[in-house]
Image (cartoon, rainbow, N blue to C red):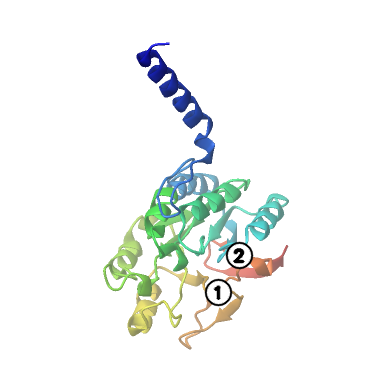
Amino acid sequence: MSINHLCRSIAVMASLCLMASCDLIDFHPYDVHITGDTDINARNVSRIEEACKDKQQIKVAAIGDTHRWYDELRYFVDAVNERNDIDFVIHDGDISEYGYTQEFLWTRDYLNELKVPYVALIGNHDCLGTGRDAFGAVFGATNYAFIAGRVKFVCLNTNALEYDYSEPIPDFKFITSHVTDRAGEFDCTVGVMHARPTDDVFNNNVAEVFHQYMLQLPQLMCCINGHGHSIHHADLMGDGFIYHQTASIDDRVYLLFTFNNDGTYSYEEVAF
């Protein structure tokens, strides 16, 4: 065998070995290497708006702080899929524990098993490492809004501590824009966020100001938040307006809201 032939043979064998071992290659946990579905929120918002367009009443299951509790998340998905009265699911943040890309992909893949659409918000843990980039790639913008029935949901990034004033968190301009944006299509509003005013990662220099901005939204019914890891219904500002806090998923309970187009709503705590 000639030297050239031997070299070519070695090169071919090396290539085959490398191809055979591709499944063993692992990316750095903070590499934003995204496989599978992306831009989840935008696609599911379209599904929600279309499915709920003419409804007078909608039911929304709210969860948060799934972190590393994947078994419990799967139980939640199974529980929702057993029902036929839930229109969509809101995950109000802390999808990940460490901001690893794979954590976002695992959670996305579990939630993709839902029979109903879902949307997700960014939590403070999701801002760790390259988590912001991973969240953006998988789910989309950190501030967004959509309409279900005649109810507008204004979803906000409120994790101010994680941004060190590098961005307007919370974004008052965004909130104000949704006082009138698509005004003819909705009658009342729900606010959704990860950290609520008075939480440790909220910019509490503007807690009361934030609350007043939120109250400018047409017929604001309530706000939904996570971060606290336990269910809590609080009149934070002493004016009768309620912030509803979801539990972490390991408590195996979610909040089920019923929102009516006349501006009334109710909720229940559902164990699974």
Against 46, is 207 above or below? below
Callout 1: 10 Å neighbours few (<14), some, many (20+)?
Answer: many
Pair 1/2: label in front: 1
Q: Nearer the viewer, residue 94 or 116?
A: 94
Q: Secondary structure at mark 1?
A: strand
Q: Nearer the viewer, residue 271 or 37?
A: 37
Asked which quadrant contains residue 186, the reply is bottom left
Q: Nearer the viewer, residue 81 or 239?
A: 81
Q: Position of residue 191 (x, y in %)?
A: 45, 67
Q: Position of residue 205 (x, y in %)?
A: 33, 84
Q: Position of residue 28 (x, y in %)?
A: 43, 51
State whether residue 149 appears in this view: no
Asked if labels 2 and 1 touch by Cβ distance under 8 angstroms, the answer is yes
Q: Amino acid at mark 1?
A: His
Q: Amino acid at mark 2?
A: Phe
Quadrant assignment for the C terminus: bottom right
Say which residue label 2 marks. Answer: 257
Against 60, is 16 above or below? above
State whether residue 166 appears in this view: yes
Q: Position of residue 47 (x, y in %)?
A: 51, 44
Left or right: residue 83 compared with residue 96: right
Left or right: residue 207 compared with residue 116: left
Say which residue label 1 marks. Answer: 244
Q: Secondary structure at mark 2?
A: strand
